[in-house]
Amino acid sequence: MKRKWILILGMLVVLVGLFSLDLAKSRPRPVTTAIRSSQPVVSRATRTSDQASSSKKAANSQPTHNSERVLIIYYSRSGTNYPDVTLKHGHTWQIAQEIAQVTGGTRYQIQTAQAYPKNYQATVDQAEQEQQDNARPRLKGKLPDVTQYETIFLGYPIWWSDLPMPVRTLMDQIDLNDKVVIPFSTNAGSGWGDSLTTLKRQYPQAKFRKGFEIEGADVDHAHKQIRRWLRDLGY
Amino acid sequence: MLKKYPLALYLVWLIALLLFPAPLVLSLNLGMGAGNTPQLIWIDCGVIAYAWWLFEVFLATRPTWLDRLIGLPALYFVHGLLGVDALLIAFVHRNFLISMGAQIRLTGKVAWYLALFGIIYASLFMSGWLVDRLPVIARVKTKLQFFFKHRLSLWIHRLNLVAILLIWLHVHLIGRVNHQLVFMLLFDGYTVLILSAYLWQKWVAPTQRRTGQVLATQRLNERTVLITLVFRGARQLFQAGDFFFFTFEGISREAHPFSVVNQADAAGEQIQILVRSVGDDTRKLQQVAVGTVVQVEGPFGRFAAIVEQDRRPLVLIGLGSGLAPLLSLARTYLGTRSIQVIWTVKNDRDRYFVTDLAALVDPQFSYFIQNGRLRSEQLSTMISPEKLAQARFLIVGPASAVLSIRKMLRQAGVPRDHLTDERLTM
Ligand SMILES: Cc1cc2nc3c(=O)[nH]c(=O)nc-3n(C[C@H](O)[C@H](O)[C@H](O)COP(=O)(O)OP(=O)(O)OC[C@H]3O[C@@H](n4cnc5c(N)ncnc54)[C@H](O)[C@@H]3O)c2cc1C
Ligand SMILES: Cc1cc2nc3c(=O)[nH]c(=O)nc-3n(C[C@H](O)[C@H](O)[C@H](O)COP(=O)(O)O)c2cc1C
């Protein structure tokens, strides 16, 4: 008899516990997530006073106002992509493109000296290994000169819940402390993963502004979302 | 064609394969939106595999009401086949679905390999699928059984529960899935309910089982004992030919199945069983003391239900100790129809039921005892052509012998749905 009630009670407790866990997890995740540094959304250093005080409309009407100061660094993989699509340009590339159109910023694409395998799973496996080894794959071409920019959009796909290691190679070599950094990223369900923490650890002095994160498969339909995000940032 | 099995069995398959997983699959697909997630179908495969695994656990609680509908062997067959299906579809899931979370992959992978091991082990040690058909494997099993006793096998089989918990964790770790509220509520609800049902059967139900005592024992020969058990105050304990799972206090904590030997209606408070020594526990039972406390789970079995479907003559073929439930049937249905008993034994010392058979007197009753196996040419001389065409055949004994007799009877023209058997292994 006693066992019966222990079991029933135990079952109810577990059920209630799990259901509340499920409820907690299900709160809609915002499409975009912000990391804030100690500074409020707009930082002094990056904004000329007219820009900072201008309304959104004003910013929109002068889209190129700040253009020389915006650099869009991104990494993106073309070819076979998740899930089973072949892309001429990667998902993250598409967002970078959109940002460049709106902000008039300069694009810089990170490229590895040695291309990743064409085969998707092989890339995934290699990326896993690189992450476990904390590797820094060599990059192709000259690094961007960031001194002339104040705002850096940094874009990357989520690989194994974090930044792809080639992006880490670049990050080790250019210093974005004291810049305004706006992350954007595509993924297949991991959201930002741990990438924001990694970024923040690398550039503790940078001013991070509200980033943009989306599942790669949704990028095609994300014009509006991207524009809204940029508008909210003042572009 | 559908007549071959009870309708309930088709229903069980329908529920197991489709209806049980459906709410999970639907809620997930509606939540994630079929258009947006091209890999949804591979995710669904994983969900279905999990639902099948849960259903298997439910079957493992061997509900007596379900046994009455489809029979325990069919129940375990569904249990086993679902396990194989789940493993296959889980393979599709992990082969096509790309996942990047290290823990997600790890939990999924370990669970899959555990399940794979579980199936290989179970099909060798816990089912007759291979052992009853391939003598080589039967020999391997007999050798290994020195170490892998049935009791150890049960514990090894329970590793499947670990696999289920791993998959539970696996699902909770997946970001795109764990915020689908309806799905997650169902998922956790299913899991908790089924695991509770399992715990109920293992931990609560034993305290509620019927308890009796050993009333008398009679050694029939050096390897066989007839045990009479009494359950005071009980009525209608069983139907003819049923079996129970018995746990004898002080002998072993494991429950062993044995068939009733006595007549159903006359039994009153008593159950009589025949125990042949084949392993540790059955050896100890040869000397079980009068007064030993016994718990029973059951009754199980479908013989009475099948026999009572119609008024066909009965041919009861018992192989060794397999005569036990058939004797119960013969005693119960004596005089109601034509009954022919065929009993094969190893040697003269094993003819312990000869007086019991001789005591059954009825113009429509006959019996035949033989040392050594039946040969196929014997069947046509022993059993009349009308009986071969009309009678219901019940065969009980060790699995491989049962299978070979089934084959002989089929060749002699007995329709498949006139054949029912019980194999003394599970
Ligand atoms: C439906 C049914 C009815 C049976 N009726 C009788 C009967 O009337 N008289 C009789 O002597 N024997 C009967 N048996 C067989 C009997 O249950 C086993 O011989 C007994 O459980 C062996 O236990 P052990 O510990 O001595 O042997 P072990 O060394 O543990 O095992 C010997 C063999 O028995 C099987 N076995 C062991 N434990 C179980 C269990 N809990 N459930 C199923 N199989 C098991 C194993 O497959 C193993 O190969 C019946 C079996 C079944 C399935
Ligand atoms: C090596 C590799 C690892 C990945 N790891 C993850 C991951 O951990 N989580 C995730 O959600 N998506 C992961 N993805 C999927 C990508 O993040 C997603 O498809 C992204 O949109 C690809 O962007 P791109 O086309 O710009 O390269 C991974 C993809 C690759 C190639």
Image (cartoon, helix red, strand yellow):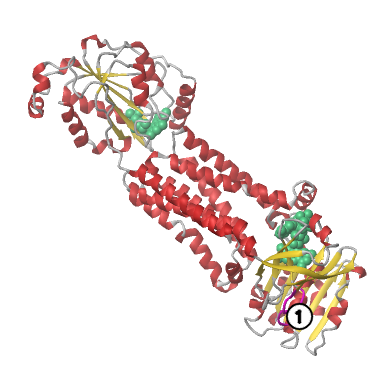
Can you give x and y, in whole percent of width and height, for residue B320 in the image?
82, 68
User: Residue B65 appears in which quarter of the rendering?
Assistant: bottom right
Q: Is residue B232 visible?
A: yes
Residue at image point 23% right, 21% down: A39
Which residue occupies the extreme right position in the image? B348
Can you give x and y, in whole percent of width and height, for residue B125 in the image?
71, 51
Q: Main secondary structure of the magenta part?
A: loop
Can you give x and y, in whole percent of width and height, for residue B272 in the image?
77, 72
Q: Nearer the viewer, residue A143 or B133?
A: A143
Range shown magenta: B261-270
Q: Is residue A78 visible?
A: no
Instruction: Name the element at disc 1.
Output: helix
The amino acid at mark 1 is Ala
Residue at image point 47% right, 47% down: B46
Chain that bears disc 1: B
Quadrant in which the N terminus of chain A is drawn = bottom right
Q: Nearer the viewer, residue B343 or A37?
A: A37
Can you give x and y, in whole percent of width and height, for residue B330 in the image?
76, 80
User: Residue B345 appears in which quarter of the rendering?
Assistant: bottom right
Reading the image, the residue beneath label 1 is B330
